[in-house]
Amino acid sequence: MSENTKSIGETLRDARIAKGFTLDDLQQTTKIQKRYLIAIEDGKFSDLPGDFYVRAFIKQYAQTVGLDGNDLLDQYSDQLPSTKTQEYVDRVNEENPSTRSAQRKVDDRTAKIKRQVPIIAAVIVVVAVLIGIWLATTRSSQSSNKAQNVDSSSVSVSGSSAKSSSSAKASSKKPAASSKKVSKSSFSKVSASGSSTTYTMKNAPKTKTIKIKTSNNAWVSVNSAGNSAFQGTVTSGSTRTVKLNANATSVTLNLGNAPATKVTIGGKSLPIAKSTSSAASTSSTSASTTSGSAAGTASSASSTNTTSQVQNITVQFK
């Protein structure tokens, strides 16, 4: 640390100014709130959400202004919160798929029970109907026995049984007829401007579950109805699941490394534009020095008219 005449905040501020970025530009690119960016430059790390976000935000900031995030964190490690704190360890574990396996099993069991409830209810209704038919048939048979002989009574019971069988068949066909009315979800592009794209998701499911998976570390943010549903780094090979409010009408995703990211909404894959050969070459060079996001390639991608690593995607639910 004795070789560093500048603080980490001053180093980042100088790099930002050298790139010609304002704090507003940086906020739009990284989706990190402006007040957090100011706190980083001023060295006021206590103003950030937690120890985990200090390093994550600094790394994202550094990569966006063309610095090596990992080297910068190592160089100024004595100025940053310890990675051994319980809050930091808990946050890292939260991002680890293996630590979420137990919770996922509980969620799966709950979902399975919820799926079985309608089936059980339908079975109960069918059994009640059959019992009602049986009772009605029995009473009819007993009344017929008093006025008719055994043969005519048998005919009556047979006729009633045929009616109940026909009623049961008609009842069993109703769910099949209604199932044909279900329409599959689909995406259609509404508009595209630079790194921003808007889609419409027709026949969106009531339960809007977003799953994000990357083949390389990527910074991702998910916003719905003006609120942040998720913001952080999705590690390589892991899957981040985000559940939106059932009444959500739209969602906006900021993907820091779009070509390496796969997103599904309600099990339907969201179309994400891939980099062209020129952009892919630029992105691969940047990716070798970054682990969380490719936001630093945005300016070079726009100058060569190729698809940017950083993409803002808005999906409107219909």
Image (spheres, grey):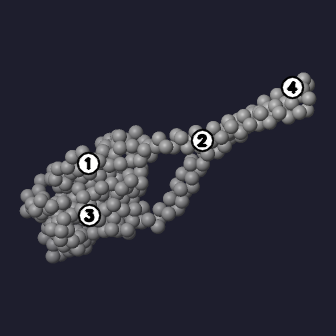
Q: Is residue 275 left or right of residue 270?
A: left
Q: Amino acid at mark 4?
A: Ser
Looking at the rendered structure, the kind of residue marked 3 is Pro
Secondary structure of the residue carrying numbered label 4: helix
Which tag, 4 or 2, sits closer to the chain's start?
A: 4
Residue 173 placement (x, y as % from top left): 60, 41
The image's mark for residue 143 is 4
User: Would you say the residues marked 2 and 1 are in contact, meaning their CB atoms lie under 8 Å apart?
Assistant: no
What label does residue 173 carry, if any? 2
Q: Is residue 167 above or below residue 284?
A: above
Q: Secondary structure at mark 2?
A: helix
Can see residue 182?
yes
Which of the two residues, 80 or 236, is positioned nearer the viewer here?
A: 236
The dot on residue 259 is 3
Give the structural element (helix, strand or loop) at label 1: strand
Look at the image and tell me whether residue 93 can be seen.
no
Give amino acid for label 1. Lys
Please name which of the two marks, 4 or 1, marks the residue nearer to the observer. Answer: 4
**Which quadrant, please, contains the N terminus?**
bottom left
Q: Earlier in the sequence, mark 4 or mark 1?
A: 4
Q: Which badge, 4 or 3, is on the more N-terminal residue?
A: 4
| Distance from the alpha carbon under mark 2 to that under mark 1 | 38 Å
* Alpha carbons under labels 4 and 3: distance apart: 77 Å
Instruction: Name the residue at 67% across, 36% down.
Output: 167
Dot placed on the residue nearer the N-terminal end, 3 or 2 = 2
Q: Are marks 3 and 2 in contact (CB under 8 Å)?
A: no
- Residue at figure coordinates x 26%, y 51% from the top left: 313
Residue at the outermost top position? 147
Per the image, the residue denoted by label 1 is 189
Looking at the image, which is closer to me, 30 or 156?
156
In-image side of 283 versus 160 (left or right): left
